[in-house]
């Protein structure tokens, strides 16, 4: 199969042929149909988060089950599935207390004494599977707890972006913030995750939704997806604009970029008792905090990895939202590209002017 391989951080991805192992117990072989390009992948490509190499990135994907190993119960051959990087074991403390996104997923990876899932076709050397998935490839071999079956009428290019961007953004609203209808929201950053957050806030009945981004095109997309107000984060008084418009600040401020300045804006936009939720991947040496006065006025700060999802339940519901016309995934997808254009897709992401690029693998077959 063809795959895009990260040979070393800071270098373009290389298209090469890999061999994928046969499914073992509880493993599922999936023919990848579509995979979104996520900013998290770019962090590994640029080396902001040092990756093990050589590896195959990609984690926002949808496809069709080709084979299943023994003891697989949740999916079957022919199922249309969405993958999720927060693979879960199902029996640790986090899983049994409903915090599946915090599970390490260690039991969903192959033990080191077993053959690897991915090897180079030409020499049999190991290629590392990243985040349990490695979706920048024509096939994925994953644990059954890293995918979920969905409605077969769902277009798989739209389904792919649910696997990360929408799960993270919508999960922040529904799971982490538990937004009450009428509450106010500010979303800092209008990329794929931020736009999904805005759309989910609209679905949840937020009273007022502020979309903050420095790029006019993204602010326009935010309005289309449900924002009631837009703010240029380049303005020195961006937080004051939000606080003035809301007579004190928002109930929830959600950071969807991964920058300290964006996190500071989220905190500064809160009303007394409000909560800032950080979704973006910050540089590893950065810290985000609350001042003494923030604490005295009851403000709160939280992380929400992957939107604190429970993806076997959440993903089919999000698919249903799309099928019923509530979730706008068409606006989030900016372009569909073949695997060979993956590096150009990441270059567009760096420029920051558009939403999601999605790889369509059938163009390569």
Image (spheres, helix red, strand yellow):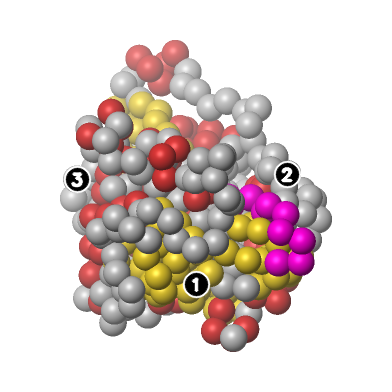
Front-lying residue, 212 or 30: 30
Q: Nearer the viewer, residue 10 or 78?
A: 78
Q: Secondary structure at mark 3?
A: loop
- Tell me whether the residue at label 3 lies in contact with that at label 2, contact meaning CB atoms closer than 8 angstroms: no
Left or right: residue 188 compared with residue 47: left
> Which of 270 and 82 lies nearest the eye of the viewer?
82
Which mark is drawn over residue 180? Answer: 3
| Tag nearer the camera, 3 or 1 | 1
Please, is residue 354 above or below residue 50 in the view? below
Give the residue at x 55% y 79%: 360
Report how far apart the C-alphas of labels 3 and 2 lie in the structure: 39 Å
Residue, far right: 11
- Magenta stretch encompasses residue 365: no
Q: Which residue is rendered at x = 76% and y = 66% of the image?
A: 122
- Magenta-colored stretch includes residue 124: yes
State which region is magenta.
121-130
**Image point (62%, 73%), residue name:** 1
Q: Is residue 318 visible?
A: no
Q: Residues within 10 Å of mark 1 (few under 14, many from 20)?
A: many
Residue 147, position as x, y percentages in the image: 37, 59
Can you tell which of label 3 and label 2 is closer to the viewer?
Answer: 2
Q: CA distance from mark 2 to mark 1?
A: 26 Å
The answer to whether marks 2 and 1 mark residues whose Cβ atoms lie closer than 8 Å is no
Badge 3 crowding class, 10 Å Cα cut-off, few under 14, some 14 to 19, many 20 or more, is some
Q: Is residue 11 left or right of residue 105?
A: right
Q: What residue would you read off at disc 1?
A: 32
Give the residue at mark 2: 47
Place of residue 17 in the rendered image (x, y in percent of width and height, measured from the top left): 70, 70
Going from N to C along the chain, the mark reached first, 2 or 1, is: 1
Return the disc, 3 or 1, that comes first in the chain's sequence.
1
């Amino acid at each position: 199969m063809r795959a895009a391989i990260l040979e070393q951080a800071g270098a373009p991805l290389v298209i090469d042929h890999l061999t994928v192992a046969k499914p073992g117990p509880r493993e599922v072989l999936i023919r990848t149909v579509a995979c979104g390009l996520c900013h998290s992948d770019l962090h590994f490509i640029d080396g902001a988060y040092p990756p093990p190499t050589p590896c195959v990135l990609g984690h926002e994907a949808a496809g069709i089950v080709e084979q299943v190993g023994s003891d697989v119960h949740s999916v079957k051959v022919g199922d249309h599935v969405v993958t999720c990087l927060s693979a879960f074991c199902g029996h640790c403390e986090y899983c049994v207390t409903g915090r599946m996104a915090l599970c390490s997923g260690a039991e969903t990876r192959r033990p080191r004494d077993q053959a690897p899932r991915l090897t180079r076709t030409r020499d049999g050397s190991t290629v590392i599977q990243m985040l349990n998935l490695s979706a920048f490839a024509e096939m994925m071999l994953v644990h059954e707890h890293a995918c979920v079956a969905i409605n077969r009428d769902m277009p798989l290019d739209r389904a792919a972006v649910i696997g990360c961007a929408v799960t993270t953004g919508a999960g922040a609203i529904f799971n982490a913030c538990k937004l009450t209808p009428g509450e106010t929201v500010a979303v800092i950053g209008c990329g794929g995750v931020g736009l999904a957050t805005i759309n989910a806030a609209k679905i949840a009945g937020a009273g007022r939704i502020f979309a903050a981004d420095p790029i006019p095109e993204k602010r326009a997309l935010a309005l289309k997806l449900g924002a009631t107000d837009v703010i240029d984060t380049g303005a020195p008084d961006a937080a004051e604009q939000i606080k003035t418009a809301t007579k004190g600040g928002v109930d929830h401020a959600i950071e969807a970029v991964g920058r300290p300045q964006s996190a500071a804006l989220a905190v500064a936009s809160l009303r007394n008792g409000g909560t800032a939720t950080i979704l973006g991947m910050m540089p590893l040496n950065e810290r985000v905090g609350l001042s003494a006065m923030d604490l005295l006025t009851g403000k709160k700060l939280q992380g929400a990895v992957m939107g604190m999802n429970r993806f076997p339940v959440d993903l089919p519901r999000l698919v249903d939202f799309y099928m019923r016309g509530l979730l706008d995934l068409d606006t989030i997808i900016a372009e569909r590209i073949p695997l060979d254009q993956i590096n150009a897709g990441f270059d567009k992401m760096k420029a920051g002017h558009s939403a999601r690029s999605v790889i369509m693998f059938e163009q390569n077959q």
